Amino acid sequence: MIFLDLCLLTAVIVIPNPFLGEDIPTAFVYRFDGFIYFFIFLALSTLAYSWRTIWGIGIWVALLWLIGFLGVGWLGHTIPQLTDASEIAFQGHSLVEEELDPNSVRPTIRVQEVVVILIVAAILTLKGWRSNQLLMRQADLAAERANLSRYFPSSLVDVLASTDRDIGAVRTQNVAVLFADIVGFTEFAEQHSPDEVMDLLREYHAFVERSIFQNGGTLDKYLGDGVMATFGTPETRPGDAANALKAATQLIKETEAFNRELEEKGISPIQVSIGVHFGPVILGDIGPSRRLEFAVVGDTVNVASRLEASTRELGCRCVVSEELMKQAGQSDSPEAPQMGFSLRDPIKLRGRQNAVNVWTI
């Protein structure tokens, strides 16, 4: 359609108006400078955000104008008497005679118009291409931020997006690791429909995410009905251990509120088990280049997972290592019991020789 519009405009410019009522040479229409209207089409093409469209219009205009120019030169109507009168009037001034001859198509001007339209089209095409690259880059950045927001709290996303540091570089640092799981979820899934199971998981994951993000944690991964979160990734902060403890207690309160909603719907309440530990971990990108994943691994992660599993044996909802309590400044102060935690006898964890001092709630 754009090409047809350009063809129509070319025809209107190079073909004399039949309603003028006066016999004029076809070449005389060039005196009306109709070529400038092509620049309106070129300017409008920039609104399409397609550099190919801009360059296409530039090429089309150049070709159509050359075809029109050649057509007028070879097939156009001429009035020889006007040329003769021009030669007599401007005798001795050949340049003026050529420019003012009504039968002259003024080829140098036509070539200049083609060159100018191509230059302007090339500049606008380059501008359109660079704008597209910028838009794509902004879209990629927005996608990266959206991806970051799935794992990190919103307050940390802007910091990560603006930092020059390679977040995926492999390194070791002290981190608080939290594992949470639904006790007896397999049995629940057997007794309820798939829709009910998925609805419960969505609501459960929603308040788990809220408990983690509101306390500055990182949602490392979902493990079916379980979840792993870290506090201190990708950057460590002084309150990481305390934040992990707060997230655990908030998660317990959120579960209690969720259970009240389940009871109102006639659904059996769920029980969440939580394990939290603090210590050194190895973190960074792992996997092949086509499937990179930011991971946190090490003994601290294993201990936190086994602390969560020990809640079944201890008959409690949350097991916290003494290392985390010390780091959070809780073990030697009365604040820990006030939060509902109590010191238990040391327990043995699978894969570890020494018993672990723990606090439970």
Image (spheres, grey):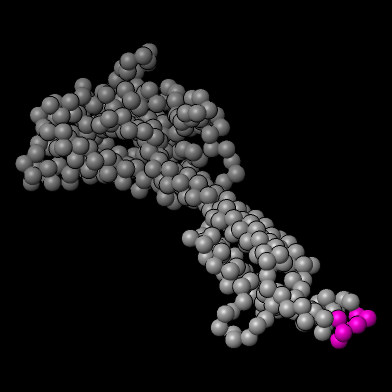
Count of all numbered marks drawn on residues in the image: 0
> Which quadrant is the C terminus positioned in?
top left
- Residue 198 is situated, as x and y percent measured from the top left of the image, at 20, 37
- Compare residues 126 and 343 and report the one nearer the observer: 126
The picture quadrant where one finds residue 40 is bottom right
Residue placed at 8% from the left, 44% from the top? 265
Between residue 349 and residue 201, name the one nearer to us.
201
Any part of residue 116 in sight: no
Q: Residue at x 65, y 83 (%)?
A: 23
Magenta span: 87-93
**Pick the front one: 168 or 247:** 168
Query: In the figure, 244 relative to 308: above or below?
Result: below
Q: Residue at x 50, y 40 (%)?
A: 235
Outermost residue toward the left in this view: 266
Q: Position of residue 41 (x, y in %)?
A: 57, 67
Q: For this view, does 78 lie left or right of residue 150?
A: right
